[in-house]
Each structure stands twice: as C-alpha cells, then as structure tokens.
Amino acid sequence: MAISIKEDLLLPAPLEWTNLGYKITRKFQVTGLAAYSPTLRPIMAATATDAVTGFTIPGVNTPHPDRPDAIVESVRTLCAGADCFDVLCQYQWSLYPSTYLKSFNAGLVQVLRHYDAGNNLATVTYTPAGGQPQTLVADLHRLILNATLSFHFLETADPESLTLTYAGMVNSASWRNYPPRTWLCLPISGSTQDGIWYRNTYSFAYNPETWDQYAVFKNDDGTIPTGIAASIVTDGSVTSGNGWSRFVVFPQADFNQAFPNIK
C-alpha cells in the first residue's frame, strides 16, 4: 500500500500562547506503513512523502507555509494502528511576528576629542614674554553615544559570505535616514540546521561623528602652525586644507543595496 498523508484541519486549539510566543500544532495522519518493520514505522512516518501529491512531512527548522516566521521545532509520532501513525509538527512562532526582530543597545562612552560642541577645533595659544605665540590642540573629554543596532532574520542568506563581504564597512550613502559613514557593519552571525534556512543577526555600531578621522600637522614640539586651526572644516563639506585632512578609514558600501530588508 502506498504512503498517504492527510492533515487534520479541524485540530482543536492548534494555536497556543507561551512565554516565548505562539506555538502552532499541525497534525498529520500517515498510512501505508505496513511494509516496514515496527521499529522503522515511526521513523518513516516522521519523514513520509505522499505517493500521490508529493507532500512531505515538515522537518525541524522548516517554515510554516502561511507564517514563514513560524518554524518547526519538533516532530512527534504517535502509533494509531499497525498501518497508521499520527505525526504532530510543533511550530514556534516568535513573540515578534514581524518580518524581523530589531534590538537596540545604547550607552555613553568617554572619548578624547579635539573639537568643542560647535565642532570648532579646541586650541590654546600661549605667548611667552618676548617670544612667539605657540598654539596647541586641546584634548577634551566628552561623552558620546555608543550604540549597537541589531536585526534578526530567518532567511536563506549565508552569514559566512555576508560577513566576508560587508563586515568592517561603513554606509557610503544615507541609510535609514542617518548620514554616510555613521554606521559600521559588525560581523554577521547565524546558525542553521539544514544548510538552507539561517537565523542571522546583523549588527551595526553607530558613531554620531562618523567613523572618519582627522589629522592635523604639528611641529616637532607639538604645536600647530598659525592658521591651520582656523581653517579646519568639520561639517564634511571639505575634506582637506593647508595642514589638515579628513580621512575615510573604513571601506564603504551602499547599505541600502547590501541590506534591502533592513528599513
């Protein structure tokens, strides 16, 4: 007798709320197992394919056909006769049933900065008696936002390939309404049980002052030649001047194209 699979569409209470989210139960009845030994029947039932329709019992880590974010976490078989087994597929539906889960961690970190709140280079000039003026760049302590933004997806994209391509890059264009080079892509992590579907996490570190760095010419004694301090432009409209330069230190990618699912 050929294997036949029928789904119980009238299963009582197929949806259950738990502290982890929703659990969805699908029940299938598999017949045509008499040709197998009693030991093999539950195994064959759990992996059965219908001889007519080609339908296969959903395996662990398989998305629900109507809810891609609900994933099979267990498959159980119950003997219903010598030739019949009931198969229960238990899906876990995240507490966050959107296309992705977003998490944001933020804090403040103290950094040394050479600019005041108005992005003016902080300099101090000293003129000794009978000597020439000497200008020094001041090291100011400032608290800036230290934030990491993460997105969690169920998808077929291989995290190894994504990490090798994008980790260590900054956004070359405006992304999620933030200026260029303010988001740094961190290593992309993921796990899989079948080599097809991955649970991936994309993380990005934020720097409100961009990930660029400034370099200023200094004399051997640490002083800055007269005129350089006043010429520095910190709003990004100019990248260099006489005695100073702003450097883009991380490679860039258009995150709008690289991560189209992240909005």
Image: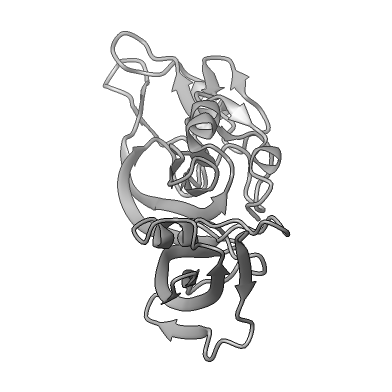
Q: Where 117 sits versus 92, above or below? A: above
> Measured from the top left, where is residue 219 in percent x and y?
36, 10
Q: Is residue 48 visible?
A: yes
**Which residue is more in the foreground, 171 or 262?**
262
Residue at 31% across, 35% down:
139
> Measured from the top left, where is residue 257 in percent x and y?
71, 39
**Which residue is more in the foreground, 154 or 247?**
154
Which quarter of the rendering shows the C terminus? bottom right
Which quarter of the rendering shows the N terminus? bottom right
Residue at 49% across, 34% down:
211
Colour style of the rendered protein structure: one colour
Q: Where 17 sits versus 7, above or below? A: below
Q: How many marks?
A: 0
> Measured from the top left, where is residue 29 in percent x and y?
55, 73
Q: Is residue 244 found left or right of 37 in the rendered image? A: right
> Measured from the top left, where is residue 262 in percent x and y?
63, 52
Residue at 48% across, 26% down:
214
Quadrant of residue 28 within the rendered picture: bottom right
**Which residue is more in the foreground, 167 or 30?**
30
**Which residue is more in the foreground, 17 or 106?**
17
Q: Is residue 177 found left or right of 20 in the rendered image? A: right
Residue at 65% across, 34% down:
172
Q: Residue furthest bottom?
A: 12
Q: Is residue 120 visible?
A: no
Q: Residue furthest top?
A: 220
